[in-house]
């Protein structure tokens, strides 16, 4: 059966454009549209779409309010369309906290370098989100799925796939003994789709006295990362801020890699952060692989690398390089991922020392390191 999509936007032109792009994929069917949040809620009840695309600013009822109401009543994956401005960043982060699972720029020129690539990205994102789990089927803050039959089936299948992958994948053998957690010099965390909310859950349990520095690599536009760092800092005990070139890693401080650039670590009398332009053709800006790989030399493998929810496989090769020099690698389990892509790539490669549900990762950091 095709993936059913509801398109919500107050612009008739934009609704038609999105519908035309999605309907050009034989595996996707736009089953309806709405021009405000109030209509969207009614159409979700009526049409039971697999994915909803949602604008933020609309008359009658805005997108954030609509997301909150849909996730409370009929949870499902919601993809936001956002402007790449400071105001757009704040609103998009609010939408993600309300329960939306991902976002794309509203201007197609901000999505990709050409129209065809942007169209392909939108279709691929909808396909991926249709398979999303956890937050796509539960209201924010709720541990119980609201639509029992489909969520349970998806979770059971996800757990089965993850378990089979771990059994089949030969564990990667390190060329050095595994570094004990209490001897680590840093925690590196990589994530993408679903990451903003996942990072909040991981970081909140950490005390202000957390003894290690943390580097956060979240796939996110350049205009979003300053607002996201401020938001994390306001809700966490540890200090969180956007990384700057030349920053020194410090205990109890989490540095967020700036969007649109590459963040790596450099060895010296103190481990420093380097921010640089991305080479032409680089897909991920920032790249988890680039950050992880740089820690092989900069921190001599004395690293705990954590891979959270996200689309694709960014982080797998960096985790492989770290594992070879004695680092430990954790990954998020399938059942609690919005998209089980990045953690799956790590687990299927035999790189995960531990696979944790999202709510257990923060407490495990505290127990293992503090």
Image (cartoon, rainbow, N blue to C red):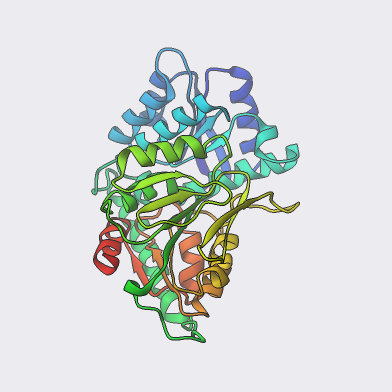
Pick out the residue farthest to the front.
269
From what the image shows, is residue 136 above or below residue 81?
A: below
* Residue drawn at x 63%, y 47% as measured from the top left: 261
From what the image shows, is residue 329 above or below residue 287?
A: below
Q: Find residue 153 and report its horizontal and vertical position in percent.
A: 34, 57
Pick out the residue farthest to the top.
60
- Nearest the camera: 39 or 86? 86
In the rendered image, which quarter is residue 61 located in? top left
133 relative to 257 in the view: left or right = left
Q: In what quadrant of the picture does the C terminus appear?
A: bottom left
* Residue drawn at x 39%, y 71% as measured from the top left: 184
Q: Find residue 57 and report its horizontal and vertical position in percent.
A: 48, 20
- Nearest the camera: 159 or 362? 362
- Nearest the camera: 130 or 63? 63
267 relative to 353 in the view: left or right = right
In the rendered image, which quarter is residue 113 located in? top right
In the rendered image, which quarter is residue 73 located in? top left
Question: In this figure, what is the number of numbered marks?
Answer: 0
350 relative to 115 in the view: left or right = left
210 relative to 118 in the view: left or right = left
Would residue 75 be seen by someone viewing this image from the given angle? no
Q: Find residue 68 and report its horizontal and vertical position in percent.
A: 33, 30
Q: Find residue 12 and report its horizontal and vertical position in percent.
A: 59, 18
């Amino acid at each position: 059966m095709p993936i059913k999509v509801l398109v919500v936007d107050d612009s008739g032109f934009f609704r038609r454009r999105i519908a035309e792009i999605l309907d050009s994929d034989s595996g996707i069917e736009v089953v309806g549209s709405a021009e405000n949040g109030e209509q969207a809620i009614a159409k979700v009840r009526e049409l039971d779409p697999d994915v909803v695309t949602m604008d933020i600013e609309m008359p009658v009822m805005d997108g954030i309010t609509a997301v909150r109401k849909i996730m409370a009543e009929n949870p499902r994956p919601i993809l936001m369309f956002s402007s790449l401005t400071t105001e757009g960043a704040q609103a998009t982060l609010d939408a993600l906290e309300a329960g939306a699972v991902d976002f794309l720029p509203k201007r197609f020129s901000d999505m990709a370098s050409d129209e065809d690539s942007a169209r392909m990205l939108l279709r691929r994102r909808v396909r991926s989100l249709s398979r999303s789990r956890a937050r796509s089927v539960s209201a924010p803050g709720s541990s119980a799925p609201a639509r029992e039959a489909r969520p349970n089936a998806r979770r059971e299948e996800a757990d089965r796939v993850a378990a089979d992958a771990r059994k089949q994948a030969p564990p990667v053998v390190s060329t050095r003994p595994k570094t004990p957690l209490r001897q680590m010099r840093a925690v590196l965390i990589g994530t993408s789709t679903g990451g903003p909310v996942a990072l909040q859950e991981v970081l909140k349990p950490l005390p202000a006295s957390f003894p290690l520095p943390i580097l956060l690599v979240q796939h996110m536009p350049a205009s979003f990362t300053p607002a996201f760092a401020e938001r994390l800092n306001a809700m966490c005990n540890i200090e969180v801020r956007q990384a700057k070139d030349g920053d020194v890693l410090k205990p109890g401080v989490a540095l967020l890699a700036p969007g649109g650039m590459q963040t790596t670590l450099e060895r010296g009398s103190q481990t420093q952060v380097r921010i640089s332009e991305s080479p032409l053709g680089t897909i991920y800006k920032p790249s988890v692989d680039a950050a992880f790989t740089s820690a092989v030399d900069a921190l001599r493998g004395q690293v705990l690398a954590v891979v959270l929810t996200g689309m694709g496989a960014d982080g797998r090769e960096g985790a492989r390089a770290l594992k070879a020099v004695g680092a430990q690698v954790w990954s998020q389990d399938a059942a609690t991922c919005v998209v089980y892509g990045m953690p799956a790539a790590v687990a299927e490669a035999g790189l995960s020392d531990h696979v944790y549900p999202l709510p257990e990762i923060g407490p495990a950091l505290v127990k293992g390191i503090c």
